[in-house]
Amino acid sequence: MWFIEDETPGYKLQWKINRVLLQKQTPYQYLEVIEMEEFGRALLLDGAIQITEKDEFIYNEMISHVPMLTHPNPGKVLIIGGGDGGAAREVLKYKEVEEVQLIEIDEEVINAIREFFPGLAGVFDDPRFKLIVDDGIEFVKSKQDEYDVIIVDSSDPVGPAVNLFEYPFYNDCFRALKQDGILNIQSESPFFNRDIIKKITGILNGLFEYVNTYLACIPTYPSGLWSFTMASKAYNYSGASLERARGMNTHYFTPDVFQACFKLPRFVHDFLKE
C-alpha cells in the first residue's frame, strides 16, 4: 500500500505505508495518521504530510532555534499552529522562556498527537506551556506589545491556513510583538512556491526592520528544500548569541547550521530580488 501526495500535475511524492491508524474529517480539515515503512508514523492534513517520526526534528528545530537565538531574551513566545508540539518542545529548551502559548484551531490535531505521538505530546505537560484551542488569526487581533517571539507554524496556504499568509494577519502579529519582537514563518518550498515566498517577504519588508529567508533540507516535504522567513523589529540574525545553543540537545540544528542556513542558493537569492 502506497501513500501519494500530489504537489503539481507533474510532480508527486509517494511512500510505502504499513498501516492506516486514523482517518477523520474534522470541522476544519481531513486528518490522517499513517505508519510509513521508512519514516515511521506520520500526521497528514488534507493529504499533505505535516510531520513524520523520522524527520520532524529538522523542521521543528529550524523554525524554533533561529528566532530564539536571534532574540537575546525571549521570555514570552506565541506559536500559532504547531499542534504537534514539536516547535514548543524546542522553544522550551531555553531557560529564559517563562511562557509558551500555543494556539491551535483544530482540537482533533491535539488529540491525534496525544494518542499516536506520545513522544511529542510530553511537551503539553510542561508548566510553562499553555495550550489554547482557538483561531490564531482572531486570537492575535486582540494582542498588543505582548510577545518577544511569534512563530507561525502553519500548514500550507489552503483551508483554515490560507489567511495566515495575508497582510492583515502579519500586521496583527507586528502589533502583538514587543518593541524588539521577532516573527518567524514557515514559507514553503523555493522550488514550487516562489510567488508565496516573494509575497511574504514583500509584506514583511513593509513592516519590519530586518527580513531574512533561510533554508533547511526536509526529506518528506516537496522538493526536500524548505524555506522559513524571519522578520525582526530590532535584531538581525548576524548579531545572534550562538553560545546559548552550544551543548543543547538537537539533532539537526547547530551554531554552524545557523550561520549556513542564511547563505542562499543563487536561484533563491535572485527570485527574492526580482
Image: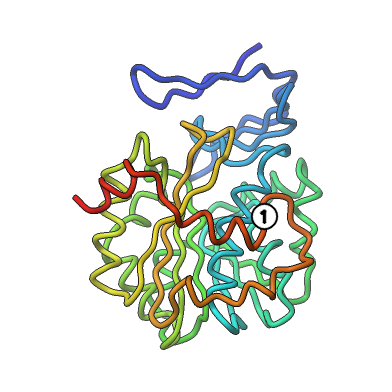
Q: Is residue 81 above or below residue 92?
A: above
Q: Position of residue 25 (x, y in %)?
A: 54, 35
Residue shown at 39%/72% (left/top)? Answer: 173
Q: Residue at x 52, y 35 (%)?
A: 221
Q: Badge 1: few (under 14), some or many (20 or more) residues near its Cα, within 10 Å?
A: many
Q: Position of residue 226 (x, y in %)?
A: 47, 43
Q: Quick check: 158 above or below 213?
A: above
Percent from the top left, x then y, of residue 189? 41, 40
Residue 3: quadrant of the picture:
top right
**Residue located 27% across and 51% down the image:** 272
User: Which quadrant would residue 71 be assigned to in this image?
Assistant: bottom right
Image position of 252 (left or right of 9): right
Tell which residue pokes out farthest to the top in this image.
Answer: 1
- Residue at image mark 1: 86
Residue nearest the viewer, comparing 121 with 272: 272
Kind of residue sitting beneath label 1: Gly
SS for dot 1? helix
| 49 to the left or right of 270 | right
* Residue located at (69% from left, 75% from top): 244
Q: How is the image coloured?
A: rainbow
Quadrant showing the N terminus: top right
Foreground pick, 5 / 194? 194
